[in-house]
Amino acid sequence: MLINILVSGVGGQGLLTLARLLGQAAIKEGMKAYVAETHGLSQRGGSVVVHVRIGNDELSAPLIPEGEVDIHVSLELIEAVRNISMQQKDSILISNDKIIRPSIPKIVLPSRDDLIRVANAVKHFYLVNASEESLNLGNPYGANIVLLGFTTYILSEGNIISKDSVRQEVANIGRGKVREVNLKLFDVGYEKASKNVRPDTVEYIRKKKA
Amino acid sequence: MSFSSLARLSGGRHFLLGNEAIARGALEAGLGVAAAYPGTPSSEIVESLMSVKDILGIYVEWSVNEKVAFETAYAAAIAGVKSLTAMKHVGLNVAADPFMSAAYTGVEESFVIVTADDPSMHSSQNEQDNRWFGVHAFVPVFEPYDATEAKDLTKAVFEFSSRFKHPVLLRTTTRVSHTRGYVDLGPIPEPKVKGKFNKEDRYVVVPANARRNKQRLLQKWKEISKAVNEFPFNSIQGDGKSLIVASGLAYGYVREAVKYLGVEDKVKILKLATTYPLPRDLLLKSVEDVENVLVVEELDPLVEKEVKSILYDEGVKIPVRGKDLVGMEFELTHYRVRKAIAEFMGVRLLSTDSTPLTVDVKLPPRPPTFCPGCPYRPFFFELRRFLTQEKLPYIISGDIGCYSLAYNPPYNLQDVTIEMGSSIGVGGGLSVVTEDVVIATIGDSTFYHAGLPPLVNAVWLRKPLITVVLDNEVTAMTGHQPAPSSRRDGNLQPILIEEVARGIGVKFVEVVDPFDIKKVREVLKKAVEYVKTNREPAVVVVRRRCALEVVRDLTRAGVKYVTFKVLEDKCIGCGICYDWFSCPAITSLSNRKASIDPELCVGCAACVQVCPTKAIVPSEEYDQEEVEKYWR
Ligand code: SF4
Ligand code: SF4
């Protein structure tokens, strides 16, 4: 068994947390996992990718081979499209419905419609309004946890990691109000997935497990 | 779980970064002293140790640079206390002087030097392969391949160092340092933190002693070369007529690639954790009945050259491939390793049954940039305007730190940046050989790291150089380690840059808040005139705290801060705030008017003064005075 999850987005959007919680949950369930993080320079608002690999003992290298991403979770639409070449048509793309303008003078941004059109070429594409949901819950920085909840649904239905394991990891960060909001964000994402994710997407992951 | 919460645990499986695993291994080996200057990708090693120093009673310091850190840890080791220093690859250039001597003198207790190399230069100016330092200095080199191994290997190299009373070099690369993997914790013994220095001639490297040291060193080297054959982290795996030698991280890629290519039954793998000296006997054993050899390693062909040299010595005539198939530059990838092995084994590398996804929209690049609220942004914004409006011929001599990002548009304010502290040294040189206004820009931490000697040089030799010290009171890029300039670091007294400048004889010294852009302009103007008239250095200290630190402190203290917004009817769509001031939180709407993203804005208020129509205002009321306290 080997699941390759690519997390992409803009430095500062909480990619590392999302990735680490997934890896941690996998370890707790007795699997082997790697999370290859990005630190330093590029974290300052640049394009960032984090590689998450979950598997058994045969797993021994940190990066995901080119084109072998099973689930691509993106915190931002431009970055989702930028990294789409890491996956195949028949794979999963979960993207936050959010565009962040690169801070470059006179830049021309691609339209949201165009980006979505490209993303739609991925068979299992899900656009999630994670930033909006997060703002609605009074936390502008929680899109990552909403997407974590969404991804967890697919992983747990696909019998990779259980919902409880990941939720427990979310519960372990922060206390009191922070913890409460995080769990809510996670549940919102999970709920959304349970309503929107198609059976063939779950089937795709189940096959990977086998 | 944070690293510090594991300090009291002596078992269990946890998910640690490679760097955290190294720190844990050091603790389990009985580490007493650690010292470092931060640098990506090495920083989390000593950061982790710092987080447990009070719990375990060990001594840990952030030193002003790698040389001093090295000397601090070396001192502990010659006084019988197990020690570690960690640095990024280029940091070892700074510490090269004591590094060479340390091998000559040897030590009394474990002395582990971690070098974190950065293939592909994710955060660095070059991708030098520091294993050569081991060759250069007669220091054995060890390489783990993942976090799990890193913990145990670190523990083992402490023992190795102790056994030979010799420094050892533990080399990681970015993907080892910054990849998390599982780590099984072991017990941490009661650390020994106080030692006794036995005075011996070997520690005074006057020529007579140095000559004896060299002879002793060569003798010791023979023993070390023998011992690596028994080192448990090296192994021969599988069997076949072809041998693949893989060191460090390369082992992980090779292991996956031979399976992917279906050649598992045809190859033997020599997994190496000791890359220099090479375990000679083990290598010879592994080439028995072998027809060809492929060496896979990250960056330079160090192992490859060693393998060739040993086989030549022994008269073993089989072809040895390596960099000709794998390639020299940048970090390893699955594709590179698969392709090299496929060619080596004469099998076809099938392209994955892929249906490529076409991207027919043009994507804008997204280089890293100053964070929202960064104190450097208004400074560089104003410097850009000043230089352009005054039509000054200028050279900006830059340096290493967050402010290196001023290289990117719209500022374009770094013309030469080569290494830590170079801004003042190179800037001083340029001020002598050109007629341009030369401005050195350097951060506070970098200033104390390597900026002081060149500034003294510039003052002494009266160089017409303007030095701007961007003082955000912290080593920001590497994760906010304290610097001598930090005013909020417990009981330590800050060393103010303006006082240092005055102390060494700089006559023009000004301190300015970058959020006051009018004042920034005034001071720049004055400095340019001063240097022109007096032909001697001027120093400008630009001081305001790093925004990430401020936001962290505001959040911890529960102080309410607000995001800002643009009044649409007042905005004339001039674009100054998003195109030229360029805060990432400000975007342009389709009608060119500005809009602020609440997900990104940290409410620093810097943009308020750049807007010509005063269209930017707080989104709700807040205690401005209280919030401002945290920013300064
Ligand atoms: S207040 Fe203005 S400059 Fe500061 S973070 Fe918000 S948008 Fe950026
Ligand atoms: S600077 Fe002011 S007027 Fe110009 S685009 Fe920004 S908000 Fe609008």
Image (tube, rainbow, N blue to C red):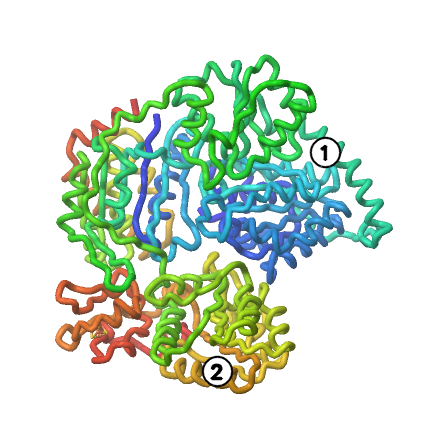
Report x, y in % for residue B17: 47, 43
Left or right: B533, with A86 as reference point: right
Q: Quadrant of residue B110?
A: top right
Using the image, determine if residue B151 lies above or below residue B445.
above
What residue lies at 16% left-to-right and 40% top-to-bottom?
Answer: A120
Local secondary structure at mark 2: helix
Labels 2 and 1 within one chain: yes
Within 10 Å of disc 2 (Cα), the crowding (few <14, some 14-19, many 20+) is: many
Mark 1 lies on residue: B224
Left or right: B126, with A119 as reference point: right
Report x, y in % for residue A51: 36, 40
What residue lies at 29% left-to-right and 53% top-to-bottom?
Answer: B365
Using the image, determine if residue B384 lies above or below residue A11.
below
Label 2 or label 1, whichever comes before in sequence order? 1
Q: Which amino acid does label 2 sit on?
A: Ala
Q: Could you say which is closer to the camera, residue B256 or residue A104?
A: A104
Q: Quadrant of ligand 2?
A: bottom left
Mark 2 lies on residue: B527
In the rendered structure, find residue B271 and report the number of the disc placed on it: none
